[in-house]
Image (cartoon, rainbow, N blue to C red):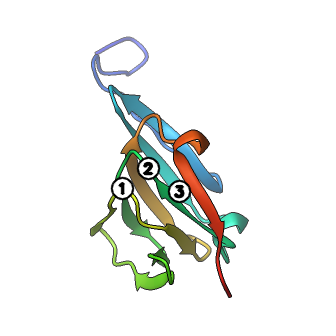
Amino acid sequence: MKENGEIEGLEVHAFEGEQYRPLMSYCSWRVAMLNHGPKFTAPTCLERHRNTDEAFVLLDGVATLLVGESAVRVAMEKFKVYNVRRGPWHNIETTPGAKCLVVENDDTDASNTDYREIAR
């Protein structure tokens, strides 16, 4: 153990703010936290990733995945892994207090993601 209480080889990451923040990357994957924020209250667009699946795990609160061309609503259950395969349109809707873990390729960004407005 190091002097400041750190254990060699162990990293601890957290994020308590709103929205989405990557916490760590390793080789080709990234782990992030997605916490409720205005962007996820009533999503106005869907996205699809051309190079990666994206896995979501609801840790707390209430969240709904919007998946596919017609944005089918899937109520998430805590601690289950929801893997959106590479290619389908999707987004997530959350309520205050929702916290989700997200795992995806580390290079996922606007250059390999398509966006479209949700038809309401």
31 w.r.t. 62: above or below: above
Q: Which residue is mark 2?
A: 50
Q: Disc 3 or disc 1, which is closer to the eye?
A: 1
Decide: marks 3, 1 in contact (CB < 8 A)?
A: no
Decide: marks 1, 2 in contact (CB < 8 A)?
A: yes
Residue count near mark 3 (Cα–Cα under 10 Å), binned few <14, some 14–19, many ≥20 = many
What's the residue at 69%, 73% (across, down)?
Answer: 44
Q: Which residue is mark 1?
A: 86
Q: Earlier in the sequence, mark 3 or mark 1?
A: 3
State the CA–CA distance, disc 2 to disc 3.
21 Å
In-front residue for pair 111/16: 111
Q: Earlier in the sequence, mark 1 or mark 2?
A: 2
Q: Looking at numbered disc 3 in the image, what kind of residue is underneath it? A: Leu
Would residue 16 be visible to someone looking at this image? no
What's the residue at 37%, 21% (across, down)?
Answer: 6
Q: Which of the 4 image quadrants contains residue 51?
A: top left
Q: Looking at numbered disc 1 in the image, what kind of residue is underneath it? A: Arg
Q: Quadrant of the N terminus?
A: top left
Decide: marks 2, 3 in contact (CB < 8 A)?
A: no
> Which percent across, then down, holds residue 45?
65, 69
Q: Which residue is mark 3?
A: 34
> Which percent across, then down, holds residue 61?
48, 75
Q: Which of the 4 image quadrants contains residue 117?
A: bottom right
State the CA–CA distance, disc 1 to disc 2.
6 Å
> Which percent across, then down, holds residue 29?
35, 36
Q: Looking at numbered disc 2 in the image, what kind of residue is underneath it? A: Arg
Q: Disc 2 or disc 3, which is closer to the eye?
A: 2
Residue count near mark 1 (Cα–Cα under 10 Å), binned few <14, some 14–19, many ≥20 = few
State the CA–CA distance, disc 3 to disc 1.
19 Å
In-front residue for pair 3/49: 49
87 w.r.t. 40: above or below: above
